[in-house]
């Protein structure tokens, strides 16, 4: 008896992660709010370190990098004028790299991300950042609608515990894994880490 297959497998789609030479990096919400703010995530330090490795590899390869930051309200979570809303030090944008502030989970919604990606000439995206089940997921799903092929770097994402419908808790690790499984069915190729991305 064979195990389950994703829709991508059943369709015969290529399952190799996007190459740095063919893609643009979209780094999503790597902000201090998730590092030491009210929404600090379990495992965020290791995920942020992997984000930094992806970005370093991209810079070395000349891959375009687009940084997404969530714009919260003044005095609240993701306050753009406070330290909590700033992009975390390990993945600070370098000079010349695009930074786009977004108001909603989907990084394409009410932003010029689509135009920024089109300006690079790339049709594939490599996504890293936070949170797996929220902004990473909604951005990957929207990217498919816009005609992009997505790769998500598993160890460069993280999420948090959530209350389960009907009671109990869904742990962050379980939610992260399930979210990636859902995305892998149709929306993205899941690469384990930065080292697994082809040049």
Image: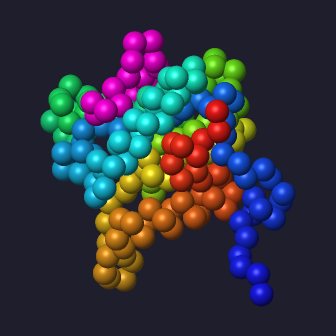
Residue at point 27%, 30% (across, down): 89
Q: Residue furthest left?
A: 75
Quarter of the image where the C terminus is located:
top right
Q: Nearer the viewer, residue 117 or 112?
A: 117
What range of the chain is rendered magenta? 88-103
Q: Looking at the image, which is closer to me, 48 or 75?
A: 48
| Residue 64 picture quarter | top right
- Left or right: 157, with 43 as reference point: right
Where residue 194 sits in the image (x, y, percent)?
Answer: 51, 42
Up-down: is 102 above or below 169? Answer: above
Report x, y in % for residue 150.
Answer: 64, 43
In the rendered image, is residue 161 in sight? yes
Report the number of numbered marks. Answer: 0
Instruction: Classify 17 as above or below 66.
Output: below
Give the residue displayed 37% in from the left and 48% down from the top.
Answer: 47
Image quadrant of residue 121?
top right
One can see residue 29 in this view = no
**Residue 51, x across and y down, in percent:** 42, 40
Does residue 101 belong to the magenta stretch? yes
As drawn, 66 above or below 178: above
In the picture as drawn, the residue positioned furthest to the right comes out as 12
User: What residue is drawn where x is 61% and y is 36%?
Assistant: 125
Camera-side residue of 23 and 142: 23
Is residue 43 inside the magenta stretch? no
Residue 103 place in picture, x, y as percent: 39, 36
Q: Answer with the quarter of the image where residue 5 lies.
A: bottom right
Of all residues, the one furthest to the top in this rendering is 96
Q: Residue at x 77, y 87 (%)?
A: 1
């Amino acid at each position: 008896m064979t195990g389950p297959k994703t829709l991508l497998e059943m369709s015969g789609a290529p399952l190799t992660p996007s190459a740095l030479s063919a893609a643009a990096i979209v780094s999503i919400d790597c902000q201090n709010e998730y590092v030491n703010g009210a929404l600090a995530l379990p495992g965020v330090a290791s995920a942020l370190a992997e984000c930094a490795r992806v970005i370093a590899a991209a810079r070395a390869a000349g891959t375009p990098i687009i940084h997404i930051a969530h714009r919260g309200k003044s005095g609240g979570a993701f306050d753009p004028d406070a330290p909590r809303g700033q992009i975390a030090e390990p993945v600070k944008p370098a000079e010349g790299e695009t930074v786009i502030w977004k108001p909603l989970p989907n990084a394409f919604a009410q932003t010029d991300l689509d135009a920024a990606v089109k300006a690079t000439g790339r049709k594939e995206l490599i996504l890293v950042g936070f949170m797996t089940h929220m902004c990473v997921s909604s951005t990957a799903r929207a990217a498919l609608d816009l005609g992009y092929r997505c790769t998500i770097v598993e160890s460069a994402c993280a999420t948090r515990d959530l209350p389960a419908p009907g009671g109990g808790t869904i742990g962050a690790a379980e939610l992260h894994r399930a979210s990636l499984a859902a995305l892998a069915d149709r929306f993205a190729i899941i690469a384990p880490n930065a080292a697994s991305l082809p040049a």
